[in-house]
Amino acid sequence: MKKLRITLEGKAYEVTVELLEDTGPAPIVRSSSVQAPLVQPVATVPVAEGCTTVICPMVGLVFKCLVKPGDVVSANQTVIVLDAMKMETPVVSPTSGTVLTVLVKEGDAVDEGQCLMQIEG
């Protein structure tokens, strides 16, 4: 097993690969027909002063959005449920306050580190 870091369009991924044969260094392949998969960049969201952002902990789909702008939430309250690998994972509010913006909707694909919502207070 060998651990490698691959960077694709500025985002680093760590992968583990199994070497089936150790034949020395891999040959360099140059081909104009090989293209990297298209990755949609995550838009940066300006953070309002005094706001806390709720950050996505993993890649998945938004299964349920339990709050909307204007709702009052408490710290550690579940605000979004993600579907990741057929498992429901709760995303909790890191603080108490009022939901200012919800940046995703049910069914959206989300990436690790993506801002899901902003909470004021």
Image (cartoon, rainbow, N blue to C red):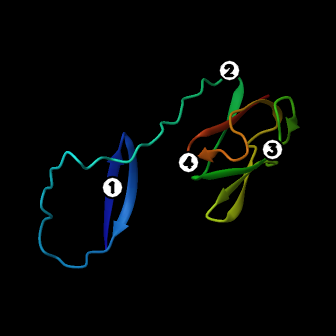
Label 4, label 1: how far apart the Cα atoms are: 17 Å
Q: Name the residue under label 1.
A: 5
Q: Is residue 106 above or below residue 27?
A: above
Q: Nearer the viewer, mark 3 or mark 4?
A: 4
Q: Is mark 1 on a helix, strand or loop?
A: strand
Q: What residue type is labelled 4?
A: Glu
Q: Which SS class for mark 4?
A: loop
Q: Distance between the residues labelled 3 and 4?
A: 21 Å
Crowding at dot 2, Cα within 10 Å, few <14 / some 14-19 / many 20+, comes out as few
Using the numbered discs, state the Cα–Cα distance from disc 4 to disc 2 in whole angstroms: 23 Å
Q: Name the residue under label 3.
A: 75
Please state, as top left, top right, bottom left or bottom right, where the N terminus lies in the image: bottom left
- Residue 71 point in image, percent of width and height: 87, 34
Name the residue located 17 percent from the left edge and 49 percent from the top edge.
31
Q: Is 38 placed above or below 23 here?
A: above
Query: Quick one: quadrant of the C terminus?
Result: top right
**Type of the residue with mark 1:** Arg
Residue 3 lies in what quarter of the image?
bottom left
Camera-side residue: 43 or 49? 43
Q: How far apart are marks 2 and 3 (CA)?
A: 19 Å
**Residue 49 — which label?**
2
Amino acid, disc 3: Ala
Residue for badge 4: 112
